[in-house]
Image (spheres, helix red, strand yellow):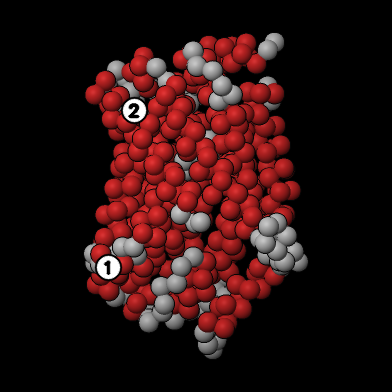
């Protein structure tokens, strides 16, 4: 049986794995988009690049670039009803176009797989800090915390391959357990309680921050529109974050879209997902920064803020152990919902390409991802010397996925939708809503490629 015959057979099968409701799909897709970057990266880059001015540019990028590409991936997935690689092949065949477009879908699957391999290591940090916070490591009587102490804790974590492996494996096994249980019994049930739980945790934490932190300073940091800081580099940062925060070009949204009901609106769903993603990022900033400013800490970006600065507060503030536990639980939940969506494209491909059971496909993915993740683990300690074009294994993998594979995948997806898909396919994608087709085509042909080019040349 040739590949086209396999594609036709798969596409003609009745789809028994459909999200039970519209809200469920929104929760799943939003869970994919909401990740660790929302919790520590977006608030910082917004504050450092003009606050409200940056937020306005970011929202414009989301509307002009992120949402159209999100609509494209979700819509393609629903039409193809298959894995990312087959979706491109199916739609290419139906459009009568030529070219190896299946390669684009294959690269998206590879991208999600590689990202998952280092994402589980970083997520393992969150799980480790949740564990030591629950056990009161930052609240030992008589212990005086300063940055040398909390920084030493973080350095010791990175220097210990055994600890990194243990917690990344635990996180990976949890992800495996959910994904291997299936769409309805695993992923759907999980996101239906995890995303509302994440929202509830954010509400609890922001209430605590309003009561115990400098909330006005945080609002000023995030929303004061300082257009003098809105440089060309700030605009490029906004473009980049609007692209990466929505899990685009990684096969996740195409795969999740393949389980989407035909009755759901691609446009409304995409708007809802982008809205939740942005709301979570802003709320996370209003949770963290009131406490940071109240205690005179620097709002440093990335892991330094979360794993070095904030533990100082947990050891000093009222109910710090409880607050710290809830905070790292929030990070764990955000990381887990994203990891699930990163594993799913590979599992779906293995199921359909090699006719494996879901359990075997998930197990094979888990075992091989763990092996690749060891490169990231060891690059943080025993292999910390630059090995690949002046980068460590971890940094090289991060650069490859973010700057090359995702950028190329986003551009190829836009060109495919803009020039290959026919009128009747776009009508099917948008449920007969012809008013969307013209602006969507303009976005795919001109706007999105322009944004991707800006993103590509930005780091140069």
Residue named by callout 1:
228
Can residue 189 be seen in this snapshot? no
Helix, strand, or loop for circle 1?
A: helix
Label 2 residue SS: helix
Between 5 and 350, the one lying in front of the other is: 5
Compare residues 340 and 247 and report the one nearer the observer: 247
- Where is 297 relative to 19, above or below? below
Residue count near mark 2 (Cα–Cα under 10 Å), binned few <14, some 14–19, many ≥20: many
Q: Earlier in the sequence, mark 1 or mark 2?
A: 1
Q: Residue at x 33, y 45 (%)?
A: 62
Residue 183 horizontal/vertical position (percent)? 52, 31
- Which quarter of the picture shows residue 449? top left
Tell me what residue is drawn at x 38 percent, y 38 percent.
448
Q: Are marks 1 and 2 in contact (CB under 8 Å)?
A: no
Q: x and y percent of residue 453 in the render?
A: 44, 45
Q: Residue 310 at x, y = what percent?
A: 46, 73
Vertical order, 9 against 440 (above or below): above
Front residue of 50 and 168:
50
**Residue visible at 27% across and 74% down in the picture:** 217
Q: Is residue 393 visible?
A: yes
Answer few, some or many: residues within 10 Å of disc 1's Cα (few below 14, many 20 plus, some between 14 and 19).
few
Looking at the image, residue 292 sits to the left or right of residue 409; the answer is: left
Q: Quadrant of residue 379?
A: bottom right
Rendered position, 88 above or below 157: above
Looking at the rendered image, the quarter that the N terminus falls into is top right
Q: CA distance from mark 1 to mark 2?
A: 34 Å
Q: Pinpoint residue 169: horizontal percent, then vertical percent.
A: 67, 52
User: Residue at the spot x=54%, y=64% of the render?
Assistant: 130
- Residue 10 relative to residue 27: left or right: right
Q: Badge 2 is on which residue?
A: 441
Q: Residue furthest right?
A: 382
Q: Which mark is residue 364?
A: none
């Amino acid at each position: 049986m040739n590949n086209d015959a396999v594609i036709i057979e798969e596409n003609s099968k009745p789809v028994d794995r459909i999200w039970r409701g519209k809200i469920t799909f929104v929760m799943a897709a939003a869970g994919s988009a909401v990740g660790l970057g929302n919790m520590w990266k977006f608030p910082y880059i917004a504050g450092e690049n003009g606050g409200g001015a940056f937020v306005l540019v970011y929202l414009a990028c989301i509307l002009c670039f992120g949402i159209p590409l999100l609509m494209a991936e979700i819509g393609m997935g629903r039409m193809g009803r298959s894995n990312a690689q087959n979706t491109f092949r199916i739609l290419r065949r139906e459009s009568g176009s030529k070219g190896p477009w299946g390669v684009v879908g294959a690269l998206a699957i590879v991208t999600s797989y590689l990202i998952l391999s280092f994402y589980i290591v970083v997520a393992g940090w969150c799980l480790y800090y949740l564990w030591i916070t629950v056990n009161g490591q930052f609240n030992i009587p008589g212990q005086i915390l300063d940055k040398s102490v909390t920084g030493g804790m973080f350095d010791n974590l990175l220097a210990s391959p055994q600890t990194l492996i243990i917690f990344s494996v635990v996180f990976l096994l949890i992800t495996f357990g959910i994904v291997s249980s299936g769409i309805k019994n695993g992923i759907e049930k999980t996101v239906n309680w995890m995303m509302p739980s994440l929202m509830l945790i954010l509400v609890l934490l922001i209430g605590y921050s309003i009561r115990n932190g400098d909330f006005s300073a945080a609002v000023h940091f995030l929303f004061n529109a300082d257009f003098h800081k809105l440089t060309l580099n700030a605009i490029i940062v906004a473009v980049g974050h609007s692209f990466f925060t929505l899990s685009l070009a990684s096969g996740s949204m195409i795969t999740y879209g393949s389980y989407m009901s035909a009755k759901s609106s691609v446009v409304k769903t995409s708007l809802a997902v982008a809205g939740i993603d942005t709301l979570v990022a802003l709320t996370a900033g209003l949770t963290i920064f009131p406490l940071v400013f109240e205690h005179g800490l620097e709002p440093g970006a990335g892991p330094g803020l979360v794993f070095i600065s904030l533990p100082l507060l947990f050891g000093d503030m009222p109910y710090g152990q409880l607050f710290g536990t809830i905070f790292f639980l929030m990070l764990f939940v955000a990381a887990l919902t994203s990891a699930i969506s990163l594993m799913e494209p590979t599992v779906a491909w293995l199921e359909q390409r090699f006719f494996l059971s879901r359990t075997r496909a998930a197990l094979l993915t888990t075992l091989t991802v763990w092996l690749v993740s060891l490169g990231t683990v060891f690059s943080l300690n025993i292999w910390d010397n630059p090995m690949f074009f002046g980068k460590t294994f971890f940094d090289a993998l991060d650069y490859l996925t973010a700057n090359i594979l995702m950028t190329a995948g986003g551009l190829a997806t836009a060109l495919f939708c803009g020039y290959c898909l026919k009128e009747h396919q776009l009508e099917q994608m948008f449920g007969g809503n012809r008013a969307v087709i013209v602006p969507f085509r303009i976005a795919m042909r001109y706007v999105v490629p322009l944004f991707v080019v800006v993103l590509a040349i930005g780091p140069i």
